[in-house]
Amino acid sequence: MVSHSLSKAIIVFIVTIVSTLGLTMGKVDAKAVQDRATWLWDTTKIVEDESGVLSFLESKQVNKLYLQINSDIASNYYKSFIDKASAKGIKVYALDGSANWVSTDGYKMQDQLFDWLHTYNENASATEQFSGVHLDVEPYLNSGWSSNQVNTIESYQTLLTRAKGDTDQLQLPLEVDMPFWFDEITYNNPFGQGLLADWVIDQVESVSIMAYRDTAKDIIKIVEHEINYANKVNKSIIIGVETGASDEGRNITFYDNGEAYMNKQLAQVHKYYANKTSYNGFAIHHVDSWMNMQP
C-alpha cells in the first residue's frame, strides 16, 4: 500500500509535468501560428527551378508563400509545386493585383483571377489547392489617385468588397498588402466614413503592412496604429519589409544592410509586439531579392 505522503508526491509530480508540457505546447502552438511569409512574383521559377525555390523557402523557415498567378503557366506546374510545398508545411496563397484594377474596367482582370482560381481549385486535390488569396492592389499608383482620389478610394473599396464575396464563395481567406500610411487617408462615401486603414483591416482576414523601413524603431512606429486597431477587432497583421534595391531612399530597404542585420531588427520588432494577438509575424519582400541578399 502506497503511503499518503508518497501519493501526494506522485500527484504533485504529475501535475508539474502536465503543467510544464502545457506551457511548452502553448509556446510551440503560439509560435507555429505566426507567419513567416514572402512573395514570389516570377512564377516561371516554379517551372524552371521548383526544387531550388522550395529548398530556399524551407531554409528560411517560410510557412506562407504569396505566389503570383500567371495563367500562361500550365496548372500541372502549380499542382506539383503546391503539393511539395504543402508537404513542407508551406501554405501557398494566390497572389495577383495591379493599380489598373481600380480603373473603370479593372473588375474584368479581377474576374479573370477568380475564374481561374475557381477552375484550378475545383480540379486540384487537397494538397494541391491554394490556401487563400493575397491581393496586391496599390490604388495610389493609378493616375486616378492624383486626379480624383475620392473616386479612386471608392473604386478600391468596391474592388475589395467584390473580392471578399469571391473568396467567400471559394471558401478561402482573403489577405491584402497595404501601405503603412493608409492610416492617414480618410474616406466619406457609401462605404461610411473613417480611416482607410481601419476599413481595409475590417474587410479581410489578414493585412500585410508594407512597413518598408530598415530599423526596428521605425518599423515599430509606423505599424503601431494598425496593430492596435487589428487587436481591437480581432484581425491579423503581418509586418512586411523590403530586401530589394530602392531609389526611394536608403532607409526603405534592408538591401544594403544584409540579412543578419535585418534579422536582428526584426527580432526587436517581434519582442515589442509579441504580446499583441493581432501581430502575426513577418513577410519578406521578395524571393528574388532575398535569395541574392548579402549575409
Image (cartoon, rainbow, N blue to C red):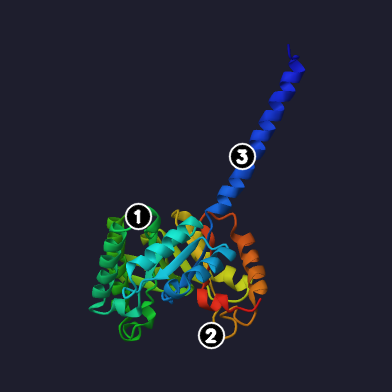
Whether residue 287 appears in this view of the structure is yes
Residue at the spot x=55%, y=66% of the render? 55
Percent x, y for residue 32?
55, 53
Name which of mark 3 and mark 1 comes first in the sequence.
3
Which numbered circle lies on residue 22? 3
Residue type at mark 3 is Gly
Are the residues flagged by discs 2 and 1 in contact, CB closer than 8 Å? Answer: no
Q: What is the residue that sits farthest to the bottom in this orientation? A: 247
Residue at the spot x=40%, y=67% of the render? 176
Secondary structure beneath label 1: loop
Secondary structure beneath label 2: loop
Name which of mark 2 and mark 3 comes first in the sequence.
3
How dense is the environment of label 3, judged by Cα within 10 Å: few (below 14), some, or many (20 and up)?
few
Kindly report which numbered mark, 3 or 1, lies closer to the viewer in this rendering.
1
Which residue occupies the foreground of this view, 25 or 293?
Answer: 293
Residue type at mark 1 is Ser
Which numbered circle lies on residue 246? 2
Figure check: 192 above or below 23: below
Q: Viewed as shown, does residue 249 lie left or right of 153?
A: right
Residue type at mark 2 is Ser
Q: Viewed as shown, does residue 184 lie left or right of 294?
A: left
Figure check: 64 above or below 181: above
Are the residues flagged by discs 3 and 1 in contact, CB closer than 8 Å? Answer: no
Percent x, y for residue 279?
53, 59
Percent x, y for residue 116?
28, 67
Query: In which quarter of the view is residue 111 placed?
Result: bottom left
Which numbered circle lies on residue 111? none
